[in-house]
Structure formats: C-alpha cells, structure tokens
Image (tube, rainbow, N blue to C red):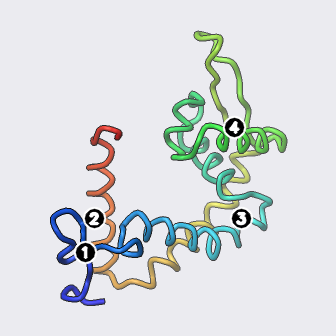
Amino acid sequence: MTKATSPWAEPGAAGERLTLEDFPTFLFVRLASAMQRDVTAGYLADFELNAPQWRVLAALAAYAPIPFSELVKLSMSDKALVSRSLQALAGRGLAQVKADPDHGKKLVCHITAKGRALYQKVLPRAQAAQADILALLGKDERVALHATLQKLRAALDTRPAV
C-alpha cells in the first residue's frame, strides 16, 4: 500500500476514515499473534516452553532478582499469566520465587543456573528467528519501523492510563 492509498495518511481528525482493520492496535495484535504462532512457537516447542514462559525466563535472565510486581509490568502480561508461567518454570527448576526478606508479603523472582543455561540455548534460536523476520524488510524500512515503534512506545509509556 502506498502512502497515497494508506488509510493512515488521512485518517480524519477523529479517525472516522479508519475501519477496524486499519486500527494500529488491531494490526499490531494480529501481527504479534501471527509472529508468535508462526515464528516463536516453532523454536520454543523444542525447549518445551510457550511464549509467556519464554518472556518470563528472558526477563529473569536480564533482570533477576526482580520483584514479582515489576516482572508483571516488564512482561506486559497479566498477573495470573505471569504467575502460571513462573510456577511452570519453577516446577522445572528454571526459576525460583522467594519472599522478600524486607517485605514479607512481596515476592522476588530469581533465575536458577539451570534456567540461565536453558535461556542461553534458546537465545540464539530466538535471535535467528527474529533476524529472519527483519530480513523481510529493507534496511531503511527496518530503521524507520524501529524508530516509529520506539516513538510510539515512549509516548505511550508517559501517557496516563485511561
């Protein structure tokens, strides 16, 4: 679709020219679902992980020890999904959840050595799969898309919740 025919070129002051299929949220969710189904699920199955478990494991690899509440925010998932993912990872010896010694009711999430080893095995496959997706775009498209997504993310991160 060219810029002249893109529904985003002139959406209307109140978005009245946008159909459901033109909503950025609709397109992003469809794209994320398709990528998770067609790209991520393939390599995660080899490691007996699902996408939410992988997101939690990757977050733990980068940020552990991390309070459970921060892990929920970071993963952009709901509390119950993060909790189930953590339970599954802990059941496999990949993660641990402990009471915060300073705040008895708060939980702190940790990655185990076994979890870090699995993360190190999955990461190269994840990187290669993501690179394959990016290869569908030209260099200028990749740079522009990254900048655009970062701009939207920054704007939404500072926007008050509705």
Q: Are discs 3 and 1 less than 8 Å apart at CB?
A: no
As shown in the figure, which amino acid type bears the numbered disc 4?
Ser
Q: Which residue is tagged 2? A: 147
Q: Secondary structure at mark 3?
A: helix
As shown in the figure, which amino acid type bears the numbered disc 1?
Arg
The residue sitting at 71% across, 73% down in the picture is 42
Along the polypeptide, which appears first: circle 3 or circle 1? 1
Q: Nearer the viewer, residue 142 or 52?
A: 52
Is residue 136 placed above or below 103 in the rendered structure? below
Q: Which residue is tagged 1? A: 17
> Which mark is in front, 3 or 4?
4
As shown in the figure, which amino acid type bears the numbered disc 2?
Ala
Residue 44's label in the rendered image is: 3
The residue sitting at 49% across, 65% down in the picture is 29
Is residue 78 placed above or below 102 in the rendered structure? below
Q: Are discs 1 and 2 less than 8 Å apart at CB?
A: no
Q: Residues within 10 Å of mark 1 (few under 14, many from 20)?
A: few
Please identify the quarter of the rendering in which residue 159 is found. top left
Along the polypeptide, which appears first: circle 1 or circle 4? 1
Query: On the rendered image, what quadrant is the C terminus found in?
Result: top left
Q: Residues within 10 Å of mark 3 (few under 14, many from 20)?
A: some
User: What separation in Å lies between label 4 and label 2 (alpha carbons)?
Assistant: 32 Å
Q: Which residue is tagged 4? A: 83
Give the side of residue 72 with respect to residue 81, left or right.
left
User: What separation in Å lies between label 3 and label 4 (alpha carbons)?
Assistant: 19 Å
Along the polypeptide, which appears first: circle 1 or circle 2? 1
Q: Position of residue 22 (x, y in %)?
A: 36, 74
